Image (cartoon, rainbow, N blue to C red):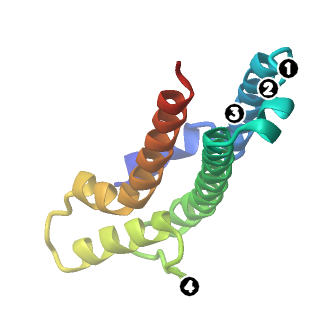
Amino acid sequence: MRDLARAGAEMKHRPYRTLLLWIIWVLAATGVYFGFYQDAGLWNFLSHDKTRITWIILAFFIFGLASSLALSIALTKESLAARQIEEDVRDKGLIGFETTSESRAVARYFQSLKLAMDSNSKPDAEALLNVELAVFQRMSRSIEVTGNLVLSWGSP
């Protein structure tokens, strides 16, 4: 277990990477999205669209952006919490790890790992990780479905 803590200490931890990549992505995506419609008279078309499907497409696009921002912020907070827990585990070891809050998936993961080790059972780290990351995977999948709907509805 100490080797794992040492290996983690040697890794460079960049908690804001997800948020930075999201900002780059959103600038590119919105630039392309509105660039396509700049010469097409989108705003004029929106005001004369009797079916309102364009409004629905735009609303789903904005919903997708907001959802992906929320996911990026959540992942950034998890990464910051992982950095703090990494320092705690490096100093005290996993046995000395104590969490005051179980609001972060990374804290729940290490707490479950510690509980399994305290009960002298062999922890299944991958299964524990899958359980804790399931909420993020569901959010990511819903954003993917939203993007697919926007593409399908927007295609001629």
Q: Are marks 1 and 2 in contact (CB under 8 Å)?
A: yes
How crowded is the residue under tag 3: few (<14 C-alpha within 10 Å), some, or many (20+)?
A: few
- Answer with left or right where residue 43 lies relative to residue 23: right
State the mark number for residue 38. 1
Q: With respect to residue 68, does 25 lie above or below?
A: above
Closer to us: 143 or 133: 143
Disc 4 element: loop
Element carrying mark 1 = helix
Question: Percent position (x, y) of residue 51?
Answer: 61, 43
User: Marks 3 and 1, how far apart in space?
Assistant: 25 Å
How far from the left and from the top, in percent, is residue 38? 85, 20
Q: Quadrant of residue 116?
A: bottom left
Circle 4 Cα neighbour tier, 10 Å, few/some/many (<14 / 14–19 / ≥20): few
The residue indicated by pointer 3 is 21
Residue 78: x and y in percent read: 58, 59
Q: Could you tell me the amino acid type at mark 4?
A: Thr
- The residue to which callout 2 is attached is 34
Q: Which mark is residue 100?
A: 4
Secondary structure under tag 3 reads helix
N-terminal of the two: label 2 or label 4? 2
Lower sequence index among marks 3 and 4: 3
